[in-house]
Image (cartoon, grey):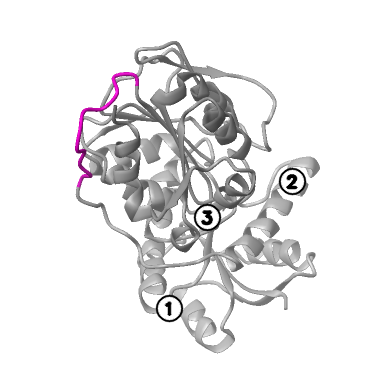
Amino acid sequence: MPVRTLVVDDSPSIRAMLTRILSADPEIEVVGQAPEPNTARAMIKQLEPDVITLDVEMPGMDGLSFLEKIMRLRPMPVVMCSTLTARGAATTIEALRLGAVDCIGKPSGNAEDLLRESVRLRETVKAAARSSVRPTVGVRAPATTTGPLRPDAVIAIGASTGGVEALFSLLGAMPADCPPILIVQHMPAAFTTSFAERLDRECKIRVREALDAMPLAWGTAYIAPGGGRHMELVGRDPGTIRLRTGDLVSGHRPSVDTLFRSVAMRGRGAVGIILTGMGSDGAQGLLAMRQAGAMTLGQARESCVVYGMPRSAQEIGAVHRERTLGALPEAILAACQN
């Protein structure tokens, strides 16, 4: 059965473009178009779509309130479709925190860019239809340890679809004195600064967007900047961040695989975690970490929005143990102990 999709956007031309792009895939059926929330609400009841594409910012409406009502009254996969700019980043981050499956840019640009973005839009909608939407998890009480932590401990995390919500939960449970945390979350370049700032306000640990040559510090998490460069760990005790240009790795830049391979040098001092997401980025890097003696953890299927990246890592033997999202903070800290 094709994925029944409802397109919600205030612009008639954008609705027509999204409908044309999505309808080009025989596995997607656009069952309706809505210019604003009241119409969309009625069409959801009438048409029962599998997925909604929703504009982040529509004049005269509070898109976040509409999304919050959807997730509270009729939880279903929602893909935010926006002009990806820094101005709308805070709104988009909040939408992802509220439970939107993903946020993608409205296809635009030259023919090559339009084709690439159109393919991503279709693949995201189909992945959203297979996702597991659940109530939003709030910030948790900090996890605790039962013994001293290794002085060379470092934590590396990779995530994609569903990862924003997962990271709010996981980082919110990390204590203020936890080891340094390096994170690659697949996210457009315009959003990572706002994402780091929002996490920093809500978590006990410090959260920063990573800079090249930035030294690691305990009690701090570092978000890889989106879009242009890979993030790696270099040096020891506790080490330094390196941002470098390079080709796409596993289809991404920054790539989880690249981060994990660089952290593997820490051996038993490292802990690798692969969270919810589409595709397989991170699987090979996590395997390199495990082979180097690091503890590796995967998010269990039942708590993933998309059990893609963790499944790929599990299938090649890269994961020591799988844990639900709620159990991961304690498992991470236990793995960091002497």
Residue under pointer 1: 74
Quadrant in which the C terminus appears = top left
| Residue 148 is covered by the magenta coloring | yes
* Pointer 1 or 3: first along the chain: 1
The answer, for residue 241, to whether it is visible in the render is: yes
Q: Position of residue 234 (x, y in %)?
A: 48, 14
- Observer-nearest residue: 219 or 223? 219
Q: Spatial distance from mark 2 to mark 1, Cα to Cα?
A: 32 Å
Q: Position of residue 177 (x, y in %)?
A: 21, 30
Q: Position of residue 90 (x, y in %)?
A: 38, 46
* Pointer 2 or 1: first along the chain: 1
Which residue sits at x=30%, y=20%?
A: 217
Residue 1, quarter of picture: bottom right
Q: Nearer the viewer, mark 2 or mark 1?
A: 1
Give the class, few, some or many, for how many residues have Cα within 10 Å of label 2's Cα (few <14, many ≥20): few
The label shown at residue 102 is 3
Residue under pointer 2: 116
Q: Is residue 64 left or right of residue 304?
A: left
